[in-house]
C-alpha cells in the first residue's frame, strides 16, 4: 500500500515537472540557440559564395578606430545619464516613502504611467519641445529673447535617456525605502543623530540595494539604446545601438552586427556582476 | 522641509508629464503643426480612421498582442507549475536563469539574436523570406514568457500545497486537479501575467523591428517609419490612442488585483473571526 502510494506520488511529480517541458523546449530554441548564433556569427565571416568561414577578423576590427570611440561614447553617456537619474530619483524616492501610505500607491502609479507611452513617441515629443521652432524657442521669441539651439548636442541625448529611464531608478529605491522601519529613524534621533547623520548613517546604507538595482536598470537600456541618440543628437552621436542597427538594417553585415551585440552582452554581464558583488558585500555588512 | 519636498515632487512630475501633455494636446490641434496650437479639432483622429494602412497596422498589432500573450500565458503557467515542483536544484536554477534572459538582456540583443536564428534558418532551408508575422509572434512569446512566469510563481507559492494532493487523493486525475483546484487558486496571477504580456507586446518596438520585413508592421514600427518622414499630428493621435489602450489594460489589471486582494482579506478576516469564536467558546 505504502509502496504503491509512493509510486503514484512519483508519477504525479513527474507529470508536474513535465508541465515545464514546452517552456524548456521553447527556451532552448528561442533563447539559447539565438545566443549561440550571436557567438557563431561573431566568429565567422562570409566569403563570396555565401559560405561561412571561421575568423577573428570581426573581433580584431573592434579595436579599430571605427568602433572604439563608439564604445567609449556609449559608456560615457550611459554613466552620465545613470548618475543624473540617481541624483534626481533619490530625493524623490525618499519623499515618496514619507508620503501618506494611502497616497503612495497612487503616486507610484503616476511615476510608472509615462513608461507606458511608447518610447519613440516620448522621445519625439521632446524633440518638439526643443526644436529650433519648437515650444521652448517659441516661448523665448514671444518674450523677446534670442533663440537657443537645444537639440543635436550631447546634453539633449542625456536628457532623452534621463527622461526615458528615470522611473526605473525611482521604483527600486522607493521600494527599499518604503520598507525601512520608521523606528530605526526614531532610534537614530533618540541616540543623538541629527537629520543629516540619520540620512547618511541609517537611510543611505539601508537603501544601497535599491540604488544598485536602479543603477543596473538605467545603465543597461541607456548603453544599448539606438533611437534616443539618433533623434536627440541629430545623428551626431553614434552609440553601440546605432552601429548595430546600421549593420543590420543598411549594411547587411550580420557578422559585424553580431560581434557588436556580443560586446554589448559582455559589457552588461560585467556590469551586472560588479553590481551584484557590491550588493552582496553590502548585505554582509548589514547582517 | 515639507514644502521643499512638495515642490520637488511637483517638478519631477512636471518633467515626467510634459511630453505626454504636449502629445495629447497637439493630437487635437487644428493646424498641421506640432508647435503652434491654433484650435481644437478631431480631424487627425478622423483621418486616422480613414486610412486603410493605419487600420491594417492596428489590426496587426492587436492580433499579435492577443495571440502572443495567450500562447505565453499557456506555456508560462504550465512552466511555473512545473518549475515550482522541480526537485533538482541546478536544473531549477538553470531553467530560471535562462527564462529570465530576455528580461536581463537589452532588447536590441534579444531582437538581434533571434533575427540571426531566423536568418540562419532561412539560409539553411533556402527560403526566400522567413521574416513577417510568424517570426514576430515567436519573438513576442519569447519576451513575454518570463513576465508570465514571474507573476504566476508567487501565487503557486501562496497556494496551500496540500490542495492538489487532496484533490488527487479524492480521485481527481492530475489534469482535473489542475483545472478544478489549482487554476482557480492561481488565476489572479495568470490573469495579471496575461495583461502584462499584452501591454508589453503592444509597446514593443526594438524586438519587432529586427524580426519583421517591410510587409508586416506593428504600430510602434509604423510610428518609427513616420518619425523618419515629416511628421504630422496624426502620429500624436495614433500614440494617444495607443496610450489610452495600454492605460485601459493597466487599470483593468489593477482592478483585478485589488479585487483578489479584497477577497483574500475577507477570507482571512472570516477565518480569524471563526478562530476567535472558538477560543471564546472554549473559555466559557
Image (cartoon, coloured by chain):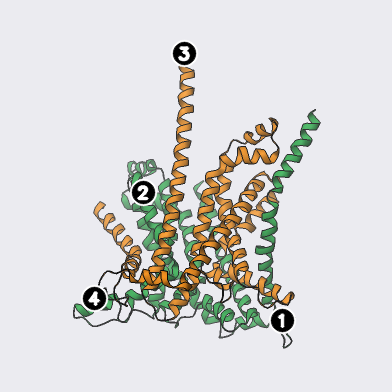
Chain colours: A green, B orange
Image coordinates for residue B280, horizontal then vertical, percent: 45, 16
Q: CA distance from mark 4 to mark 1?
A: 57 Å
Q: Secondary structure at mark 1?
A: loop
**Classed neighbour count for the residue bearing mark 1: other residues with Cα under 10 Å, few (<14), some (14–19), many (≥20):** some
Q: In the depicted view, which residue is nearer to us: B98 or B248?
A: B248
Name the residue beneath numbered marker 3.
Answer: B283
Looking at the image, is mark 1 or mark 2 earlier in the sequence?
A: 1
Image coordinates for residue B33, horizontal then vertical, percent: 31, 77
Q: Return the chain for callout 2.
A: A
Q: In the depicted view, which residue is nearer to us: A13 or A147?
A: A13
Q: Respond whether the residues carrying marks 3 and 2 are from the same subunit.
A: no
Image coordinates for residue B69, horizontal then vertical, percent: 56, 57
Q: Respond whether the residues carrying marks 1 and 2 are from the same subunit.
A: yes
Residue positioned 64% across, 46% down in the render: B81
Q: In the depicted view, which residue is nearer to us: A158 or A227?
A: A227
Name the residue beneath numbered marker 2.
Answer: A104
Q: Nearer the viewer, mark 2 or mark 4?
A: 4
Q: Nearer the viewer, mark 1 or mark 3?
A: 3
Q: CA distance from mark 2 to mark 4?
A: 35 Å
Residue A84 vertical position relative to residue B175 in the rendered view, above or below = below
Q: CA distance from mark 3 to mark 4?
A: 77 Å
Looking at the image, is mark 4 or mark 1 earlier in the sequence?
A: 1
**CB under 8 Å between discs 1 and 3:** no
The mark found on residue A55 in the picture is 1
Q: Respond whether the residues carrying marks 4 and 1 are from the same subunit.
A: yes
Q: Can the viewer see residue A159 in this picture? A: no
Amino acid at each position: 500500500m505504502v509502496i504503491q502510494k509512493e509510486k503514484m506520488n512519483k508519477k504525479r511529480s513527474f507529470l508536474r515537472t513535465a508541465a515545464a517541458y514546452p517552456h524548456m523546449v521553447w527556451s532552448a530554441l528561442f533563447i539559447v540557440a539565438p545566443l549561440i548564433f550571436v557567438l557563431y556569427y561573431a566568429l565567422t565571416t562570409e566569403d563570396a559564395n555565401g559560405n561561412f568561414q571561421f575568423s577573428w577578423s570581426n573581433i580584431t576590427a573592434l579595436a579599430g578606430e571605427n568602433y572604439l570611440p563608439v564604445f567609449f561614447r556609449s559608456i560615457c553617456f550611459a554613466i552620465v545619464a545613470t548618475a543624473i537619474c540617481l541624483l534626481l530619483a533619490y530625493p524623490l524616492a525618499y519623499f515618496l516613502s514619507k508620503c501618506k501610505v494611502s497616497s503612495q500607491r497612487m503616486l507610484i502609479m503616476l511615476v510608472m504611467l509615462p513608461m507606458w507611452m511608447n518610447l519613440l513617441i516620448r522621445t519625439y515629443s521632446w524633440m518638439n519641445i526643443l526644436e529650433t521652432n519648437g515650444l521652448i524657442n517659441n516661448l523665448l521669441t514671444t518674450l523677446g529673447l534670442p533663440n537657443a539651439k537645444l537639440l543635436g548636442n550631447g546634453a539633449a541625448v542625456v536628457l532623452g535617456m534621463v527622461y526615458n529611464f528615470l522611473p526605473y531608478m525611482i521604483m527600486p529605491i522607493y521600494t527599499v525605502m518604503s520598507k525601512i522601519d520608521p523606528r530605526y529613524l526614531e532610534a537614530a534621533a533618540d541616540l543623538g543623530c541629527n537629520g543629516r547623520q540619520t540620512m547618511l548613517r541609517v537611510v543611505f546604507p539601508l537603501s544601497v540595494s535599491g540604488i544598485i538595482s536602479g543603477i543596473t536598470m538605467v545603465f543597461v537600456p541607456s548603453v544599448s539604446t539606438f533611437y534616443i541618440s539618433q533623434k536627440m543628437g541629430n545623428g551626431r552621436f553614434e552609440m553601440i545601438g546605432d552601429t548595430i542597427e546600421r549593420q543590420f538594417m543598411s549594411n547587411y553585415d550580420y557578422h559585424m552586427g553580431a560581434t557588436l551585440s556580443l560586446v554589448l552582452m559582455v559589457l552588461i554581464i560585467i556590469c551586472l556582476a560588479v553590481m551584484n558583488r557590491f550588493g552582496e558585500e553590502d548585505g554582509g555588512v548589514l547582517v | 522641509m515639507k514644502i521643499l519636498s512638495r515642490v520637488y515632487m511637483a517638478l519631477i512630475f512636471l518633467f515626467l508629464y510634459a511630453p505626454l501633455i504636449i502629445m495629447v494636446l497637439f493630437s487635437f490641434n487644428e493646424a498641421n503643426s506640432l508647435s503652434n496650437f491654433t484650435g481644437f479639432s478631431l480631424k487627425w483622429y478622423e483621418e486616422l480612421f480613414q486610412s486603410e494602412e493605419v487600420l491594417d497596422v492596428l489590426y496587426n498589432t492587436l492580433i499579435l498582442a492577443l495571440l502572443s500573450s495567450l500562447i505565453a500565458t499557456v506555456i508560462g503557467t504550465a512552466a511555473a507549475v512545473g518549475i515550482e515542483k522541480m526537485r533538482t536544484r541546478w536544473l531549477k536554477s538553470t531553467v530560471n536563469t535562462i527564462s529570465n534572459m530576455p528580461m536581463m538582456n537589452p532588447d536590441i540583443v534579444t531582437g538581434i539574436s533571434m533575427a540571426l536564428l531566423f536568418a540562419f534558418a532561412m539560409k539553411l532551408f533556402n527560403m526566400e523570406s522567413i521574416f513577417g508575422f510568424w517570426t514576430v509572434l515567436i519573438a513576442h512569446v519569447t519576451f513575454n514568457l518570463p513576465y508570465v512566469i514571474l507573476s504566476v510563481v508567487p501565487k503557486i507559492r501562496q497556494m496551500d500545497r496540500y490542495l492538489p494532493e487532496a484533490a488527487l487523493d479524492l480521485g481527481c486525475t492530475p489534469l482535473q486537479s489542475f483545472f478544478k483546484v489549482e487554476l482557480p487558486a492561481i488565476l489572479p496571477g495568470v490573469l495579471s501575467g496575461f495583461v502584462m504580456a499584452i501591454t508589453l507586446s503592444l509597446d514593443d518596438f526594438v524586438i519587432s523591428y529586427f524580426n519583421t520585413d517591410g510587409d508586416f508592421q506593428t504600430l510602434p514600427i509604423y510610428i518609427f517609419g513616420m518619425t523618419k518622414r515629416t511628421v504630422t499630428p496624426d502620429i500624436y493621435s495614433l500614440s494617444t490612442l495607443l496610450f489610452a489602450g495600454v492605460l485601459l489594460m493597466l487599470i483593468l489589471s489593477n482592478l483585478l488585483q485589488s479585487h483578489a486582494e479584497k477577497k483574500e482579506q475577507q477570507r482571512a478576516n472570516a477565518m480569524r473571526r471563526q478562530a476567535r469564536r472558538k477560543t471564546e467558546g472554549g473559555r466559557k
